[in-house]
Amino acid sequence: MYRCRDGVPHIVLEARRPGARVVIGVSDNGIGIDPDDAEKIFQVFQRPHSQEDDPGTGIGLAIVAKAAHRMGGEIGLESAPGQGSRFTVSLPACVEDPYN
């Protein structure tokens, strides 16, 4: 999470099952992401901010996106600079109970 320098970090996790999908969401009150960088951040070694501003490798979201796509899912982003971010991962739900 890219966090604002001032203030307390606030993270919200959510999970829901709309129909035949499972949606996992993570929201924060961080620094947000410019819409021009929205697609770029899901590519390996692409970061919206400089290493000096916020450390990181630029591989985390790329790994999540690739895993989601391989499982038949998709990843989404809602964000604006200074407004925080909300990431969602939507995956096909299991149609059978794996424990029976």
Image (cartoon, rainbow, N blue to C red):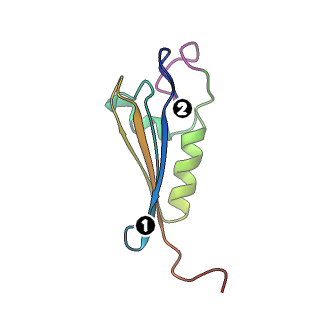
Q: Residue at x 56, y 83 (%)?
A: 96
Q: Could you tell me residue 79's position as x and y percent? A: 35, 35
Between residues 95 and 12, which one lies in front from this camera angle?
A: 12
Magenta extent: 47-54
Residue assigned mark 1:
17
Q: Which mark is residue 79?
A: none
Q: Distance between the Cα atoms at labels 1 and 2?
A: 25 Å
Q: Quadrant of residue 62?
A: top right
- The main secondary structure of the magenta stretch is loop
Q: Is 53 inside the magenta-drawn segment? A: yes
Of labels 1 and 2, earlier in sequence is 2
Q: Please name the amino acid that badge 2 sits on.
A: Met
Q: Could you tell me residue 58's position as x and y percent? A: 58, 32
Q: Residue at x 50, y 23 (%)?
A: 8
**In this rendering, is residue 58 above or below 53?**
below
Q: Please name the amino acid that badge 1 sits on.
A: Arg
Q: Which mark is residue 1?
A: 2
Q: Quadrant of residue 17?
A: bottom left
For the C terminus, give its image quadrant.
bottom right
Q: Is 17 inside the magenta-drawn segment? A: no
Between residues 55 and 45, which one lies in front from this camera angle?
A: 55
